[in-house]
Image: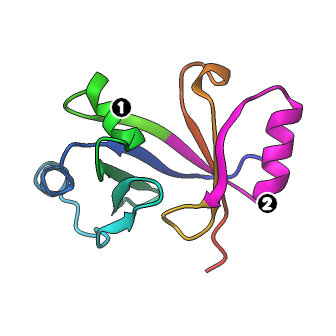
Amino acid sequence: MLGRLNHVGVATPSLAEAVETYKRLFGATVISDVIELPERGVRVQFVDTPNSQVELLEPMGENSPIAAFLEANPRGGQHHLCFEVEEINAAKADMEAKGAKVVSGPYIGAHGTPVIFVHPKDVHGVLIELMETPRH
């Protein structure tokens, strides 16, 4: 059921500063435009790597879940791992049948496909995003 690692989510207080860091330290050249997801309370930018992406997440306000994360981690840090799945509703049902708590979703994520999040307590302290494999 688990597909490829699509991206690693990294919370940051500043997309601009984080992008500059990835350019300066790692030579990143393929960086998406800023994607605003007001219903999720975040701004997102993707940094492409040869086999995956880094998703940079900046809060849009103090009610953003990323703002809460940054309160505990002011400089930012790894927020989640995202794996692709074939069909999100089947993945959600499978997670719940196995006793894992789905904390949000499905809803449309930054890639334009449905996503869910599995509670970190069920995955050894790691927040897991499951994303329906993009068809484009």
**Left/right of residue 133 with respect to residue 1 in the rendered view:** left
Q: Is residue 131 magenta?
A: no
Residue name at image x 38 percent, y 44 percent? 64
Residue name at image x 29 percent, y 68 percent? 34
**Left/right of residue 103 with respect to residue 18 in the rendered view:** right
Q: Residues within 10 Å of mark 1 (few under 14, many from 20)?
A: some
Query: Which residue is label 2 attached to?
Result: 87
Q: Nearer the viewer, mark 2 or mark 1?
A: 1
Residue name at image x 12 percent, y 56 percent? 20
Closer to the camera in the image, 15 or 60: 60
- Position in image of residue 120 (x %, y %): 58, 26
For the residues labelled 2 and 1, the Cα–Cα distance comes to 29 Å
Please report whichever mark, 2 or 1, sits nearer to the chain's N-terminal start: 1
Secondary element type, mark 2: loop
Q: Quadrant of residue 87?
A: bottom right
Q: Is residue 62 above or below residue 58?
A: above
Query: Which residue is label 1 attached to?
Result: 69
- Position in image of residue 13 (x %, y %): 21, 43
- Position in image of residue 47 (x %, y %): 32, 60
Span shown in magenta = 81-107
Q: Is residue 100 magenta?
A: yes
**Amino acid type indicated by mark 1:** Phe
Secondary element type, mark 1: helix
Q: In the image as oriented, which residue stretches furthest toward the front?
A: 63
**Left/right of residue 101 with respect to residue 121 in the rendered view:** right
- Position in image of residue 104 (x %, y %): 63, 44
Q: Which mark is residue 77?
A: none
Q: In the image as oriented, which residue stretches furthest toward the bottom?
A: 136
